[in-house]
Image (cartoon, rainbow, N blue to C red):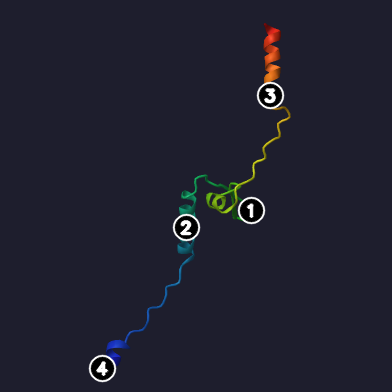
Amino acid sequence: MLKFLFGGRKPAEAKPETQREAFARLVGDLNEAIVALPEKPKFVIDPETGGFELVLPEQLPDEALALPAPEVEVPELEESVEEVAEEAAEKDTAAA
């Protein structure tokens, strides 16, 4: 009686995915990922092989968060503020 209640069913077999279903799923996943990007990639299709490439920006938003901030070089000033002020004062006196 217990075998009848609990052991009589066979487990459902997984249905194999067709090539059309697999391709549709992949394209859907790719479109979802592209929609989420602020800057859209460029698609390049190779007609000989039928393959395609994505030309992505140099840095994606999630990569920008993971990397340290770039060091900004501050150029050294050749003249001090005082020297520039003196030159401006000389030009003003020469013009007057």
Residue extending furthest toward the left: 1
Q: Nearer the viewer, mark 2 or mark 1?
A: 2
Residue found farthest to the bottom: 1
Q: What secondary structure is found at the residue carrying circle 1?
A: loop
Residue name at image x 68 percent, y 17 percent: 88
Q: Which residue is mark 1?
A: 48
Label 2 amino acid? Asp
Closer to viewer: mark 3 or mark 2:
3
Residue named by callout 2: 29
Instruction: Name which residue type carries label 3.
Output: Glu
Answer yes or no: do the residues labelled 2 and 1 have beta carbons within 8 Å?
no
Which residue position holds label 3?
Answer: 82
Q: CA distance from mark 3 to mark 2?
A: 62 Å
Q: Which mark is residue 1?
A: 4
Residue 74 percent location from the top left of the image: 67, 37
* Amino acid on which disc 1 is placed: Glu
Marks 3/1: CA–CA distance: 67 Å
Above or below 6: residue 70: above
Residue 40 place in picture, x, y as percent: 52, 46
Q: CA distance from mark 4 to mark 3?
A: 102 Å
Q: Quadrant of residue 5?
A: bottom left
Quadrant assignment for the C terminus: top right
Disc 1 to disc 4, C-alpha distance: 64 Å
Horizontally, is 59 left or right of 75 in the view? Answer: left
Q: Earlier in the sequence, mark 3 or mark 2?
A: 2
**What crowding class fits label 1: few (fewer than 14 Cα within 10 Å), some (14-19), or many (20 or more)?**
few
**56 or 53: nearer the viewer:** 56
Q: Is residue 74 left or right of residue 1?
A: right
Q: Would you say the residues marked 4 and 3 are in contact, meaning their CB atoms lie under 8 Å apart?
A: no
Mark 1, mark 4: which one is toward the viewer?
4
